[in-house]
Amino acid sequence: QERYARVEISLAGKSIADLSKLGIETDHGQFLTGRSLTTELSKFELTLIQNAGFQTKTLIPDLVAWHKEQAKNPSVISRNSNCTDFSPVYQTPENYSYGTMAGYHTYQQMLDVLDDMAAKFPNLITLKKAVSDTIVTWEGRPLWYVKISDNANTDEAEKEVLYTSLHHAREPNSLSQMLFFMWHLLENYAADPEIQYLVNNLELYFIPCINPDGYIWNETTNPDGFGFWRKNRRDNGDGSFGVDLNRNYGYFWGNDDIGSSPITQSQTYRGPEPFSEPETRAVRDFCREHDFLFTLNYHTSGNLLIYPWAYSDEPADSAFIRFAELFTRDNKYKFGTSTETVGYQVNGSSDDWMHAEKATFSFTPEVGTTGFWPAFEEIDGLNKDNVWQNLSMALCALRFGEATDLSEKVVFPNTATLSFGLRRYGLEDGPLTVTLQPVSPEVTSPAASQTFDLQHFESAEFSFPVAFANNIPNGKELLFLLQVNNGTYTRTDTLRKTFLDSDGFALLYENTGDALDGWTGSFELTTETFVSEPSCFTDSPNATYPPDAFSFFYFENPVEIPAYTSFARLRFFARWAIEDQFDFAQVLLLDETFTPTPLCGRYTNPGASFPQPTGEPLYDGFQDWVEEEIDLSAYIGQNIYIGFWFQSDGLQEFDGFYFDDLRIEYADSTSATQVLFSPDDFRVLQNRPNPAATTTTIFWENENRLSGDANLLILNALGEKVYERTVNLNTENHARLDTRSWSPGIYTYLLRTPEGQTRPMKMTVMR
């Protein structure tokens, strides 16, 4: 097998289409519009593009050797943003096993897994069957499929969906996520009502390997993994082998020589005619025999969800956009047509043919961002990234709507209602009933329900009344069940609300975007757009932002978040038009040492990769005015600065980042004492030892000779009181604490009298 290298290809004076015309596969890799494509090339391909005048830089000369070396020194790879992730936590199925090709399954291991599934769950999954009774690959192999359903061995009049993988032989994670999902369905059927609903009402078909010849070729040449053969194994008669199966389908086959190649040596060689390949003919006939409402044709890599049309720049149906929004809710994949996601048109694709031939809503997920052979340590996370995508696709074939919480994540004694939204996604008509069921006994309102009969993709907003018992502890987490019933099945989500024993939010800081006073940096005012008249802040007033921009804008003076509060937040309105995945804006919190921390909000998403900061919360893409909210409770008792950072590369420029009506608020209470003593009069000192393991001592200095009693208060990171003790200021100057029962973490402590309180201090408890 040829040596493959990871190469950065300069696009200076060139286009991605120029590269595609050479037959280079450009739908994977890191594409920087107008600048470069970093991808994995054979020696033949590298020579081809160099002879065509492209400038190249070889980053990894031998990918197989590099992967093997990396496998000897595994490292845990962080794939998530620094933001709290409220996505479902899926357990690795008990029966899921890793293969011997760097964690990926060999072809025989895949077949053994299918047999094992049928042996363990004979009523839920069929034995593997040939996709076609008459068609085999060039090397004589059938394509196999299985069906999961409640009566798997009976052909019932149920709706059908299809999952496929391994159109391309060097994309083994497309297979591993499928096997993971299949085990997830089978193992959880007995206990999970949602899986029962899907399996009882659908026939779910799986073709785990569309390209067995190519897959086995990689296994033969690289038995430890890291084979880079992409195509099938057709003998082209000129010394070259293989057709790109995802360019061989019949709809707009060979439409041009950019979206597919007539060159037999090319990775995107489309074959001599539409459906020339036995693999695509077998899939074609199988689809014609069935009525698949949805298909997910899995590939790697790119963290993308691609939908038709591939041959055109226009989406085939606006429904694809709505479905994609739902499918990518958890994994945050970028979605769109081929042009919108990989930068150019493709022809002869499976998705285009399936949608044109059978009106199937067909999608191509591209799993992961680290190439065709992600490290062993990444496999489990990548598998889990696609569980919701697989589940939600199946749900959309039935009667399904998703309810969303539109209310604050905190509630007060005077909170009277909670607001929600409902959108119908399922193809099946019928009413949906939404119920809010209190779980916590402190919520005294009874369960309430509302029923909606929505058109496809129609949404509704509504509210439920709530009432609370007296004397609920401050900071108490209250639980609710938000349920959507479709007449057959009830989908349940758990909502968590923090109760604040407070009268509401008090304003700590406000700036309405009318003046630059109190700010430092390079943002300016603009009257071009705003939320409140007459202006707002932006990095680039009255123009697009410049290339290679670096803009910072931050408070001149710090703001102190009161230690006595239990919740604080930053709110502002924002809009942005920023080159997706490359340029970005961030909201930063700076402490007293000016150390920046990127903040997570409702609308931030994890940075992709260079030039964005990988995994950090940021804003990119396009968004009209929305109200952003960021939790600042972790910084209670601290002096903070808020800043905005904007950065661009040297390529595409858009309108930039705008914000208006910025506020810092905290939970206020009429019982809170807000007068702070001067440290020269009365102060608490740093506890010793700090960090504390079993015991620690807090000292105080009473220079003003205050007399009488004071309360020593200690709060956890949520602002909840964990310790209170009365001390006598006439006779005591310290308190010794037993911390053995305290949870590890950061605590705030202070002394409070009827006249005021000391400035708070921080202490750490460790084990």
Image: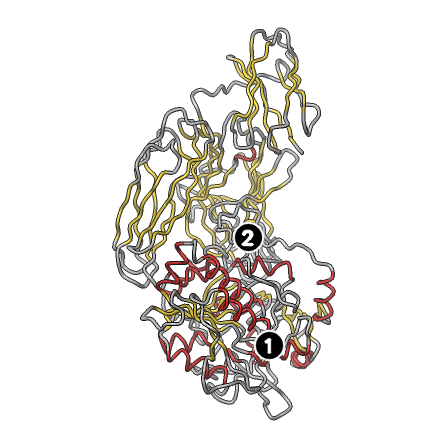
Kind of residue sitting beneath label 1: Tyr
The quadrant in which residue 54 appears is bottom right
Which numbered tag is attached to residue 215? 1
Relative vertical location of residue 462 with respect to residue 341 in this rendering, above or below: above
Give the residue number, with chain letter if any, for mark 2: 606
Q: Position of residue 673 (x, y in %)?
A: 49, 19
**Label 2 secondary element:** strand
Quadrant housing the N terminus: bottom right
User: What residue sits 68% from the left and 75% below the top?
Assistant: 222
User: What residue sits 31% from the left and 34% below the top?
Assistant: 445
Q: Where is residue 550 in the image (x, y as percent from the top left)?
A: 60, 50
Q: Position of residue 336 (x, y in %)?
A: 45, 65
The quadrant in which residue 530 appears is top left
User: What residue sits 70% from the left and 23% below the top?
Assistant: 688
Residue 221 in the figure: left or right of residue 256: right
Relative vertical location of residue 589 with respect to residue 273 in this rendering, above or below: above
How many labels, in total? 2
Residue that lies at the very extreme toward the bottom in this rendered image = 237
Which numbered tag is attached to residue 22? none
Closer to the camera, 375 or 447?
Answer: 447
The quadrant in which residue 286 appears is bottom left
Quadrant housing the C terminus: top right
Sequence-wise first label, 1 or 2: 1
Q: Residues within 10 Å of mark 1 (few under 14, many from 20)?
A: many
Q: Position of residue 215 (x, y in %)?
A: 60, 77
Q: Measure the C-alpha gap from mark 1 to mark 2.
A: 33 Å
